[in-house]
Amino acid sequence: MNISCESNLDHTDIVFYENAAGQEIDDSFEGPGASCNILTDTWFWRASDTTMDLKTTDWVLDKTLDANSHNVTFLLNGAPNQHGLLDTNITRRFKEIGERYSKSEDLVTIPSNWLHRP
């Protein structure tokens, strides 16, 4: 894949959406960007993480599909415990997500609204 960029771009920053803090991707945004969220209730590990209800696989896949449709990479946090490992419920959920995830099509043409910040 060979994607060329026009020399008249104002900037090459990647727009970052703090999705877990309520920053949603604007419908008119066409990338590039990154969006982050969490499986648990907080960014950092808590003892309660081992037994809490995590965000569902459907929720994660919906967020991923929405982000990818805007040429935004979806980053999903799973905080390691105090031993530096992911708890069983987190690894189980990541496995479920991986089993159902379908990679979106490659970007072959730069969208007309590329690098436009709403």
Image: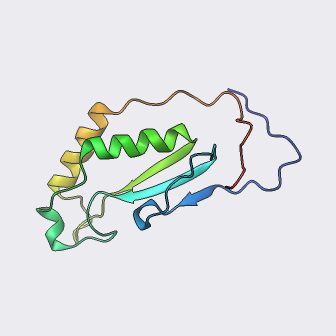
* Residue name at image x 49 percent, y 55 percent: 35
What residue occupies the far left of the structure in this picture? 51
Q: Position of residue 5 (x, y in %)?
A: 80, 39
**In percent of the image, x 22 and y 68: which residue is there?**
83
Residue 7 shown left or right of residue 109 in the figure: right
Residue 61 on image: x %, y %: 35, 40
Which quadrant is the N terminus positioned in?
A: top right
User: Closest to the observer: 37 or 50?
Assistant: 37
Work out which quarter of the rendered image holds the C terminus and state it. bottom right
In the foreground, 67 or 88: 67
What color scheme is it?
Answer: rainbow
Residue 96 in the image: above or below residue 88: above
Residue at (18%, 46%) from the top-left corner? 92
The number of numbered discs placed on residues in the rendered structure image is 0
Residue 91 position within the rendered picture, expressed as x and y whole percent measured from the top left: 22, 49
Tell me which corner region of the image, top left, top right, bottom left or bottom right, holds residue 85: bottom left
Horizontal side, residue 111 vs residue 49: left or right? right
Report whether 45 appears left or right of 51: right
Q: Up-down: is 113 above or below 41?
A: above
Residue at 16%, 53% (x, y): give it: 89
Q: Position of residue 72 (x, y in %)?
A: 55, 46
